[in-house]
Image (spheres, coloured by chain):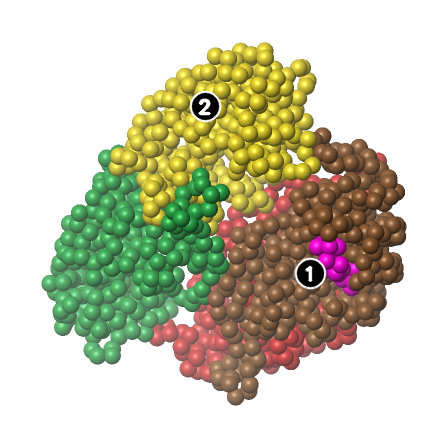
Chain colours: A green, B yellow, C red, D brown
């Protein structure tokens, strides 16, 4: 990555940051920016200035403004974190990039794959960091999942099943797939081994409350290996469930994000196919398989806020002039899956090929 | 139902019963038959006579045989419970019915909808009870679910989500859908309100261990109301999960069959659509909905073995000359869904219409 | 309560506050003070000035100091929150009170009942608020428990069982009873109905790691009604458990503070004594009791930080010139129980009378 | 052990058994005897003959009788399993032993330590097996606990905490300690390393429903090493809890008997005392300890009914002419603890020495 000089803080100096958007997620960005030494928070920007002031509170030395232009004109600002609605990402992120600012943007990157592609291309032309706030990818749990899968401990990935349901905020502009599935898809993107890619997507959904789009949806992702990943997202469930099962040929891991005492459970259990000669006569009605019933290990994970790590990675990728872990191309790959899912949803639920997982190139 | 005289026990006398099949499920039928006063167990029949003797044990006065003919020729036998592999149901059940015996048969009713239809027609011609051992429908939990849904307490049914996964026996002759989904589909069949029917089915599956058919599968069932039911079945999961969520417009119930201390949880929580005038300005980015956040009630349920109730219902339906709760037509409706699911699985996962939910007529 | 004029903020103006102590708990007091409009945080004071600065962070307008005298001399400071080690409470709180400042103090109030009594007497002489930060008493869960018990819904309180165990910080100066049991005892103090008082305490403990005092301890509190409360505190447990069961003659409630989805469960279950004539012959070997097996209700509770409510109550009690919910006398009652527990621990574990539950008078 | 010839079955032949008592537990003994090849069940004996017939059911070849004399006179009976009320054990067991029958007896062995001693002495004089049905000691979980503790994997045992509470049957003749604590005490007896013995017991209890004796009780057992074991038993709890924590210097294990998916959890976590020089200045307020925060391992355990293993051990100890795992002396050690607990309960809750853990000799 080529790095635009104007956007670089001095060596060792903190990155001057502005947060744009003081709505649902913005305050979390602010709180974590304040606690990150590698960052110097300069501005909180929101069209609703009173809201920005309220988020900062009466004791803060950080400035509030309603003007994005004021923020982008400030030389002390090297980077912006954008937490405005997805429909505004194209304009806001583009303006920031064209002002020479590095950008951290909330998911999804943009409303369409085409828009997202434009943003990634612009960032690359300017040599600027464009990072997706795929927060979950920075949790200790997902980082462990990533090393379990990519490090080989799980063996060949056989299936992925993710459930993300709770009584959620029914969005007016996007359906539940675009609201919640980016979490699961970005996690999947982050943990898949090199060379394993999604090839087709199918989605089923329903809108039982008349919200105008799906409030309950199911997504099946066919991987290039033949394995399948499945995602259940639901705004209507009275109970909150956030689990992901990653089945492997050697081990299977269950991630329950709502169980802080035991988020990950790694099972030495599974089904193996055996040769014909190994089957005892008394299992003649069964397939030629054998079962492993081993122990479960729950690794200890550090408890830390993922968004703190997002902020640090953003600052580090700027300082080190490198792509962040969740760069714009990761955002594009998620967008490609979402667009294919929408196409399947609109067309009877059959699998739709993901032809351009990354219009600008493959996974790193 | 017309009742064949030859198959009727004397008034008040127990039903003479034979269990055919001493494999995986047969011993459970035997144990419950022994404990049901309305039944008199006469025979346990298995091609493997030693196995039948082993199941009965050294203290029993019940007779064992390897001959189905011997059982069907016995006048003291009014009824048979068939727990042989599904592929044999057509022959065994047909022989029993033609010998004038009432039949309780394991799910699925038969290997194909056509075979099943033949069995139901034969039973009806002979005026004999043909009952499906849809065991779950006789659990206190499902009976409560049924009354919650059909009694109106849940309001309009909005969605159903069922998960039935564990390290299961990988079958050689049938895939995971045909093995496990009959449970979910028969439960669904039992609790849907009158007039609500499945209209289309889609299925996605994968076979990551090379078993020759799907070991992980997802089933979406479109209901005539527009609501969707979804089923996840999986033989490869190291953890056992058996939950069903029934979302309603008034209440939502979560059934966790592995939590005996709290199998059902009825939540007074949900999302309601509101009129445009009711939306406060600060939620302008949200859909026009309101949220109910009420208490949860976990009703106390009796602890009893469902198969005991199956046995009692079988005996009672014979004595009272009426159709049992889970009759042959219920079995056909489940078969129709399974056949549509297989068709979808084989054709890219799009929805396949369920044209003949019950080839012999509608739900009662 | 008589209120010293000098310590009163102007009508409607926020209470000028200083936090003394920036160690383990101080940062939480600071964070909540910053978010409480009825309070104006003026100072954070710690002997380790760098630590105070670090807690405030680089963006704050709040002042840091290492001098308690500087804080107490500031007229804009109407009140102080003391989060220094228990052994220093006597000096720090006394100085604050004698400077005319209202005081919020961490538990335990002081190292001895005598010291605590001196502090309460001083506060009362000066007409100042002396409030204990019995944080748990301000959680939505405990407030509901209090209304369940005192409002009569539970019937007569039959037993209390509290477990508070986890891999905790082994303290050098106090044992596990003095470290953890104040939580349970202050909760008990807060929820007991008027007229029900602790009359005797017994404690058993052990020090299996050679820490110099008990690391595992059990406390039994005899109540004036004959019922017993029991507390298990443990620094060595690898798992964290925080449950309290309040058994009542009409209902029993289980509080699991680590289950945010269901903190309280109110059971309509229990054992009632019945008259001799009511006992069926088949239970002749059993006591003459009957069992209620009703439903469980899990009430929805708001999720809010208790310390925010502590801060608000402190400000409100100053503004309204009234005693706070957890006043100095509540702190004395807890101290009296702790001293009796220590006496029992030192003397073979027999019950020790709590002669002076409140040396300055009874419960309000 | 000297073995009376008259009570011995022929070499390789099954042990002829009679079950005496068809009440609460008797049917479980019958069911497991029927399924144990090493045993031949000859009789079920109960004063209420109809009850005995009902337990056997209409298909059984086992004989029923109301006469203990008839059973004891039968030469085909080599052994009896006694499941009558504790108060009758002295007479029934003595008669059986004096008739030359081996005896398996429900806990507690007898109503008093003196009675129990007489039974053990009689069995030893006659060279007969006297085995306690300490069922829990034969569960896969307790057998693993035993090997974890005695095999050294846990390090030095630091504390034991056992909770056994549920809405239980309030007994008329014995309090909750004598009803439930024998389970915990027999488990403790079974897993303690050689040379570690209980030296004193204290008990606190209450009777909030007026049952005439304690319905809620707490037991503290001081071990010879200085460690403490604590037991909470309660008939009034609406929720069922059965957990035991065994804290060790190297590992700690948590047993949750109601979680079949994860009964045991072995934690590599704990607190170690460190030398003075190892403590960093910033922890100067803490004791000189260090913390281990390692993984948790949940070992896979077989699922099998413990009573089946009891029956097998009884038959094997008879055939092999050896003492069973839970012999009469184990029963005496439990009785000694119960008597000391009752003494403490009656005398203010102070520790009472266990002077004669085994009046006939020490632990093996």
The residue carrying pointer 1 sits among few (fewer than 14), some (14 to 19) or many (20 or more) residues within 10 Å by Cα, namely: many
Above or below: residue D58 compared with residue D302: above
Residue C174 seen: no
- For mark 1, give the secondary structure: helix
User: Which residue is at 41% across, 17% downward?
Assistant: B360
The residue carrying pointer 2 sits among few (fewer than 14), some (14 to 19) or many (20 or more) residues within 10 Å by Cα, namely: few
User: Are discs 2 and 1 located on one and the same chain?
Assistant: no
C-beta proximity under 8 Å, tags 2 and 1: no
Region rendered in magenta: D314-335
Across the whole image, how many numbered discs are drawn on residues?
A: 2
Residue A68 is drawn in which quadrant? bottom left
Viewer-proximal residue among C191 and B69? B69
> Residue lying furthest left in this view?
A125
Residue A45 image position (x, y, % from top left): 26, 61
> Residue lying furthest front in this view?
D11
> Residue lying furthest bottom in this view?
D277
D166 displayed left or right of C172: right
Task: Decide whether residue D330 is among the magenta residues.
Answer: yes
B29 displayed left or right of B204: right
Q: In 3D space, how far apart are the residues under numbered discs 2 and 1 (Cα atoms)? A: 54 Å
Residue carrying label 1 = D187
Residue B90 image position (x, y, % from top left): 44, 24
Disc 1 sits on a residue from what chain? D
User: Which residue is at 40% across, 45% downward?
Assistant: A288
Residue A20 is drawn in which quadrant? bottom left
Disc 2 sits on a residue from what chain? B
User: Which residue is at 20% across, 47% downward?
Assistant: A354
Residue D216 image position (x, y, % from top left): 74, 55
Residue carrying label 2 = B91
D163 displayed left or right of A42: right
């Amino acid at each position: 990555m080529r790095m635009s000089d104007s956007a670089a803080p001095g060596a060792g100096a903190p990155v001057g940051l502005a947060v744009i958007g003081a709505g649902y997620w913005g305050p979390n960005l602010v709180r974590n920016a304040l606690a990150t030494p590698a960052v110097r928070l300069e501005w909180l920007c929101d069209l609703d200035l009173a809201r920005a002031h309220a988020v900062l509170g009466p004791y803060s030395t950080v400035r509030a403004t309603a003007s994005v232009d004021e923020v982008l004109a400030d030389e002390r600002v090297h980077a912006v974190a954008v937490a405005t609605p997805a429909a505004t990402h194209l304009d806001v992120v583009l303006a920031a990039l064209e002002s020479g600012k590095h950008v951290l943007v909330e998911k999804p990157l943009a409303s369409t794959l085409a828009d997202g592609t434009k943003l990634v291309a612009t960032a690359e032309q300017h040599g600027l960091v464009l990072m997706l706030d795929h927060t979950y990818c920075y949790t200790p749990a997902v980082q462990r999942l990533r090393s379990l899968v990519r490090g080989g401990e799980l063996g060949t990935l056989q299936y992925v099943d993710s459930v993300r349901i709770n009584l959620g905020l029914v969005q007016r502009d996007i359906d539940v797939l675009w609201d919640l599935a980016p979490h699961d898809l970005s996690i999947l993107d982050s943990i898949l081994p090199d060379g394993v890619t999604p090839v087709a997507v199918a989605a089923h959904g329903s809108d039982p409350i008349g919200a105008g789009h799906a409030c309950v949806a199911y997504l099946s992702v066919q991987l290039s290996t033949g394995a399948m990943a499945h995602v259940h997202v639901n705004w209507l469930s009275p109970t909150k469930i956030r689990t992901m099962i990653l089945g492997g040929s050697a081990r299977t891991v269950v991630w329950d994000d709502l169980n802080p005492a035991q988020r990950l459970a790694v099972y030495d259990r599974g089904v193996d196919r055996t040769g014909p000669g190994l089957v005892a006569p008394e299992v003649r009605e069964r397939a030629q398989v054998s079962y492993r019933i081993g122990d479960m290990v729950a690794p200890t994970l550090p408890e830390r806020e993922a968004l703190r790590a997002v902020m640090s990675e953003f600052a580090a990728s700027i300082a080190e002039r490198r792509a962040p872990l969740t760069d714009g191309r990761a955002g594009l790959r998620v967008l490609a899956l979402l667009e294919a899912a929408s196409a399947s949803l609109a067309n009877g639920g059959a699998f739709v090929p993901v032809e351009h997982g990354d219009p600008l190139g493959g996974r790193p």
